[in-house]
Amino acid sequence: MSNLDQQVRDIAQRHNLSEGSAWQLVNGLLSTGGGQVQFNIPELGGMGQWMPGMVMCSDLFNNALKSRVDTVCADVASMVRSGVLKAPPTINWWPGDLGVPSTSGAQNNIRYAWFPSSRRLAVDAGGGVWVYDTGDHNIGGVSQQQSGSGGTLTFTSQYGNVNLATLPVISRA
């Protein structure tokens, strides 16, 4: 287990979050240098965003939820800004022209990264990297169905579930 994996596990335990939710916050805050994060995390009320001094949650009047979001995000942002929490140097597995994803993750042998500025989703399922056009979908979550032959990914957006088979393929490498 890498140092970053252990740090994310510690954050999840400290704030009573799943590791997947902690990863989403960590990745988002790492990509902005700890300045802000947008998320879609059911444990934190669904869609929301955080920056120092500002919390927006889908449950507008739930002050306890806002306080929880502020606490966990401030903790992670502080770790990022102080250099305690940093992404390990890696070579990106997605095409370089996509830039920096707002969210990425992996489970088993499947990796994904979403790039909202270019409206692209890159997926590496072990047989090459597929790049999809996400159109006006705002990808906020992912689930993987397990089966004997591997699994399938389903993403969520403001419109509900998005099956990869419904998205236009831009490229395959």
Image: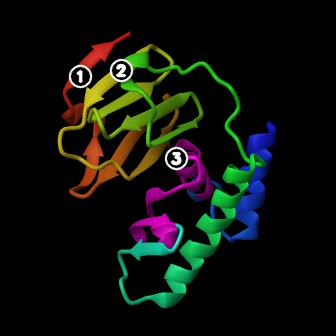
Where residue 86 appears, x then y in whole percent?
A: 70, 41
Q: Residues within 10 Å of mark 1 (few under 14, many from 20)?
A: some
- Secondary structure at badge 3 equals loop
Where residue 147 appears, x then y in whole percent?
A: 49, 37
Measured Cα–Cα span from mark 2 to mark 1: 7 Å
Kind of residue at disc 2: Trp
Please tell me which of labels 3 and 2 falls first in the chain.
3
The stretch of residues the image draws in magenta is 22-51
80 falls in the magenta region: no
Q: Which residue is mark 2?
A: 130
Left or right, residue 119 beside residue 47? left
Task: Please say whether residue 150 is visible from this viewpoint.
Answer: yes
Quarter containing the N terminus = top right
Q: Which residue is mark 3?
A: 32
- Secondary structure at badge 2 equals strand
Q: Residues within 10 Å of mark 2 (few under 14, many from 20)?
A: some
The correct choice, above or below, for 154 with respect to 95 in the image is below
The correct choice, above or below, for 6 with respect to 115 in the image is below
Q: Residues within 10 Å of mark 3 (few under 14, many from 20)?
A: some
Measured Cα–Cα span from mark 1 to mark 3: 28 Å
Return the residue nearer the eye: 172 or 66. Answer: 66
Return the residue nearer the eye: 155 or 101. Answer: 101
The reply to whether the C-beta atoms of the residues labelled 2 and 1 are less than 8 Å apart is: yes
29 falls in the magenta region: yes
Between circles 1 and 3, the one closer to the viewer is 3
The reply to whether the C-beta atoms of the residues labelled 3 and 2 are less than 8 Å apart is: no
Kind of residue at disc 1: Val
Residue 4, by quadrant, is top right
Please tell me which of labels 2 and 1 falls first in the chain.
2
Quarter containing the C terminus = top left
